[in-house]
Amino acid sequence: MRNNVFLRTATDETEISSARYNLIIGACLVWGFVINYLIVTGIDPRVLQSTNTIVFLLAYFGLCFAGIWLFNHSTKPLYSFIGYNLVVIPFGFCLNLIISAYDPYIVSNAIQLTGGVTLIMMILGTLYPQFFSSIIKSISVILLITIIVEVIMVLFMRKSSAIIDWIIALCFCGYIGYDWGRANRIPKTTDNAIDSAAAIYMDIINLFVRILRIMGRRRR
């Protein structure tokens, strides 16, 4: 579920300062995390667990793809923000189900670790954008193969592997550095800031889920 916002090399929109651009990205990320927090703390996971699985998955993927399409194709900040929220909300529902299976202490530590790793990867993405650009194709191939292997293991062996969690976590570390570096190379407009935040948000959430699973395994 990647998007091509980072292919925008020119714009007819008014560009903003780097400080404002990065502030909007940060504000959008915080907004997404706050919405996720409200969903996780405000909805009983048993309500979601009682929902028909097919209905839940159709709603999840339907909202996600609609949101990605909207912020990817729109050059209007309002429409892009709506698209971003259409991604944030179903992600929040999934996080609700995932987090309910873990001890709050582990969840808290996973959040802190994810925040620290994200900050480091953003710094590296700013300092070494060409490095991340040079490895992103390899990362994408590794991620795709690993996910396929994981799906096969879950379907036929009814289990997953800690190694898979580590590989996917490392891949999303690379994506954060890559997407952050690219976000600061495209035209600095409000719409591009929102679109970039959406892409980085998905990287961070996927990284958090894998870190949570890794830490959960270590406590068992």
Image (tube, rainbow, N blue to C red):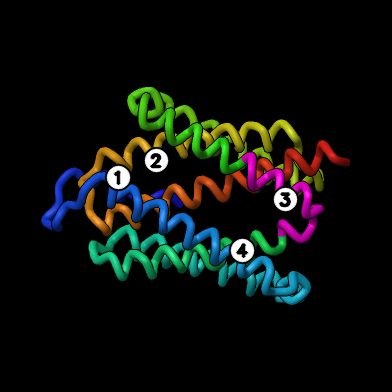
Q: Earlier in the sequence, mark 3 or mark 4?
A: 4
Q: Is mark 4 on a helix, strand or loop?
A: helix
Name the amino acid, label 2. Asp
Q: What element carries label 3?
A: helix
Is residue 202 visible in the rendered image? The answer is: yes
How crowded pointer 1 is (Cα within 10 Å; few <14, some 14-19, many 20+) is rated as some
Does residue 160 belong to the magenta stretch? no
**Residue drawn at 54 percent across, 31 percent down:** 142
Give the residue at mark 2. Answer: 179
Q: Give the range drawn in magenta.
A: 98-113
Give the residue at mark 4. Answer: 37
Marks 3/2 in contact by CB < 8 Å: the verdict is no
How crowded pointer 3 is (Cα within 10 Å; few <14, some 14-19, many 20+) is rated as many
- How far is mark 1 from mark 2, CA to CA? 8 Å
Marks 3/1 in contact by CB < 8 Å: the verdict is no
Q: Is mark 1 on a helix, strand or loop?
A: helix
Q: Earlier in the sequence, mark 3 or mark 2?
A: 3
Which part of the image, by quadrant, shows the C terminus? top right
Q: Is residue 79 above or below residue 205?
A: below
